[in-house]
């Protein structure tokens, strides 16, 4: 009878001790999980802030490049417009001078021809007039060609200036993907099998203890634990 009680008592003690150990282990795991989760949250906050600052710097660089490109284009376009305007005024002034010079030459030829007693329709007068007209036409054609080539030079200079823009560089934004948060996976309490194993272990310990007591006693005086 005492043996059964001793075995049962030690089995229960071993089972409850196993439960307490499991509860303590679970509490320790929960505390460690809270620490890991706090560290994870702090790390994610720091990484998110760093990524935001990095994107602000990227945006600043892109905006500075865009402003520089715009300034280059503005200066190139304004320079072309100014030079073309000056060229148009210069060409118009020269054209007026050529026209006036041609008219004055023809008037002078007419006066000289009449003064010399020649007919304005004479062959000599007609030949001289044609020569003056051809000279005036050549001057105008030269002026036209010169105006064209200068305008092409202005366009090329504008294109060279526009090539200084950086149109192909663009700093892409930075993306931050947080890793998975630490997970806590644990078994609540002990299972029936674990309780049974602990109980059986305690009972086995009690059996060994009873056997040890009887071995230590003189022969024939051992305790009848189950009597």
Image (spheres, rainbow, N blue to C red):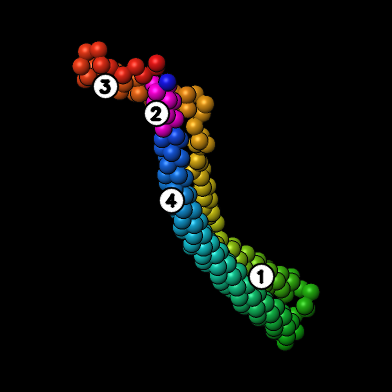
Q: Which one is nearer the viewer's eye here, 105 or 175?
A: 175
Q: Nearer the viewer, mark 4 or mark 3?
A: 3
Q: Secondary structure at mark 1?
A: helix
| Residue drawn at (51%, 50%) of the image | 176
Query: How far across and down, in percent of the image, does residue 123 sit?
Result: 74, 70
Q: What secondary structure is marked by label 2?
A: helix
Counting from the top left corner in percent of width and height, residue 94 is at 64, 78
The residue at 22%/19% (across/down) is 217
Q: Are marks 3 and 2 in contact (CB under 8 Å)?
A: no
Q: On the image, numbered disc 2 is attached to which residue?
A: 10
Mark earlier in primary sequence (2, 1): 2
Query: Few, some or many C-alpha atoms within 10 Å of disc 4 (few <14, some 14-19, many ≥20)?
Result: few
Displayed quadrant of residue 226: top left
- Secondary structure at badge 3 equals helix
3 and 1 marks in contact (CB < 8 Å): no
Give the spatial CA distance, label 4 vs label 2: 37 Å
Please report whichever mark, 4 or 2, sits nearer to the chain's N-terminal start: 2
- Which numbered circle lies on residue 183? none
Q: CA distance from mark 4 to mark 1?
A: 91 Å
Q: Which residues are magenta?
A: 2-14
Which residue is the site of mark 4?
Answer: 35
Q: Are marks 4 and 2 in contact (CB under 8 Å)?
A: no
Residue 55 versus residue 113 in the image, above or below: above
Is residue 214 in sight in this rendering?
yes
């Amino acid at each position: 009878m005492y043996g059964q009680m001793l075995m049962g008592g030690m089995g229960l003690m071993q089972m409850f001790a196993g439960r307490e150990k499991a509860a303590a282990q679970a509490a320790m795991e929960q505390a460690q999980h809270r620490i890991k989760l706090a560290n994870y949250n702090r790390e994610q906050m720091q990484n998110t802030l760093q990524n935001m600052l990095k994107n602000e710097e990227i945006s600043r660089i892109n905006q500075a490049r865009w402003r520089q490109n715009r300034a280059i284009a503005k200066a190139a376009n304004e320079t072309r417009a100014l030079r073309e305007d000056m060229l148009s005024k210069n060409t118009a002034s020269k054209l007026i001078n050529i026209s006036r010079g041609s008219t004055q030459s023809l008037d002078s030829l007419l006066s000289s021809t009449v003064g010399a007693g020649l007919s304005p329709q004479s062959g000599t007068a007609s030949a001289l007039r044609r020569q003056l007209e051809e000279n005036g036409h050549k001057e105008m054609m030269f002026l036209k060609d010169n105006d064209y080539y200068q305008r092409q030079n202005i366009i090329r200079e504008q294109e060279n200036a526009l090539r200084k823009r950086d149109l192909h560089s663009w700093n892409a934004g930075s993306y931050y993907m947080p890793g998975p948060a630490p997970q806590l996976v644990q078994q609540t309490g002990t299972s029936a099998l674990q309780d049974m194993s602990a109980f059986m272990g305690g009972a086995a310990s009690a059996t060994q203890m009873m056997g040890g007591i009887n071995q230590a006693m003189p022969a024939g005086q051992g305790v009848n634990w189950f009597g």
